[in-house]
Amino acid sequence: MKFRAVMSDYSHIREFLNIISTLSRMHKNLIINVQPDKVILQVDAEAYDGQYLWCEINATNREGFFSEFVMDGIDGTYNQIYMTATATSFVRALSFVKTNAVDYVKLKLIKTHMPCLSVEMSGSISNLQDVITPKIQHSLPVTIVPRSEWDQYELPLAMDYDLSIIMPSTKSLRALLDKKKNLAPTLVLYATMNDELSLVVETEVVTVASHYRNLKCVPAVRTSEDQAGQLTNLSEASCRVDTKKLAALFETINFCEMVMTANIRHEQALNIRFDIQQHAFVNFILPATNFE
């Protein structure tokens, strides 16, 4: 097995740190899946109840996150690597990036007395007399996941949805959900082909609805084999989800450049996708819930 990737663009390096930080706030364990054309980072939590959170980074575009990318999987048939790491340790390894200019970050799978993901970076620190250019390296312990256990980390990469709608700013939604999470355990999202999005919570005393207009809403394209390429025919779609889980996501999101889309599978699931600088995206799936 072999894995080496280099990030040379500072904006992508900062965004990579933001991605790792977001995932670390959701769960302590991080799954790193390395494939020839992409790297998938996912949290090791709650997939059993239909909730998923992961990030997919394109590894083929040399103007994207990785200016260099080399990997060899476990064998020719299964050309992938799965490893687990502690998310907070990954954040600490990249912490120099928060306050210092960095020329590059290199990730490399190494083996000393145990498998480790080497995180190496070079940056500049200025003082009154001169400029220091330190090289910093951390060895992050990882566990290589055997082929027999890969199935438990499978993601729903292709799901059919009914409507897709561009969402308002994270700042607006963060403030709104922070209030609504204390009113009711569940929240209903409604999207319509009139380019409207509504977030509604109901209690025995009151119903509180917030409406956003002039958003772009389109019917989703079916991906399943029997309906591939077909558009859904619903004029509106809704999904009831756990308010606190949705609010927790927006409390952690902190990306510089992104487009945020809500994909709704009517009364079944909500998917929020964050497209980051055209070279990566974060996916969050919440199943519909019926508890009151």
Image (cartoon, grey):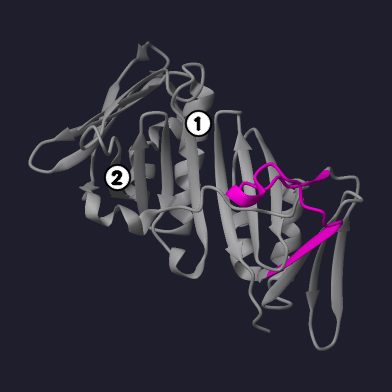
* Cα separation between marks 1 and 2: 24 Å
Work out which residue is located at the far left of the displayed protein and give it. 113
Q: In the displayed structure, would residue 232 be above or below residue 99?
A: below
SS category of the residue bearing label 1: helix
Q: Which residue is mark 1?
A: 14
Q: In the displayed structure, would residue 40 be above or below residue 31?
A: above
Residue 58 drawn at (x, y percent) = 48, 29
Name the disc covering residue 82, or none.
Answer: 2
Magenta range is 217-240
Q: Nearer the viewer, mark 1 or mark 2?
A: 2
Q: Amino acid at mark 2?
A: Tyr
Residue at x 51% of width, y 40% of height: 18
- Position of 170 with respect to 14 (left or right) is right
Residue at x 19% of width, y 33% of height: 1
Q: Is residue 235 magenta?
A: yes
Work out which residue is located at the far bottom of the displayed protein and give it. 204
Q: Which sits earlier in the primary sequence, circle 1 or circle 2?
A: 1
Residue 170 drawn at (x, y percent) = 70, 48
Few, some or many C-alpha atoms within 10 Å of disc 2 (few <14, some 14-19, many ≥20)? Answer: many
Is 227 or 147 nearer to us in this picture?
227
- Position of 104 with respect to 239 (left or right) is left
Residue 243 drawn at (x, y percent) = 66, 69
Q: Quadrant of the C terminus?
A: bottom right
Residue at x 88% of width, y 59% of height: 211
Q: In the displayed structure, would residue 102 be above or below residue 110?
A: above
- Position of 276 with respect to 219 (left or right) is left
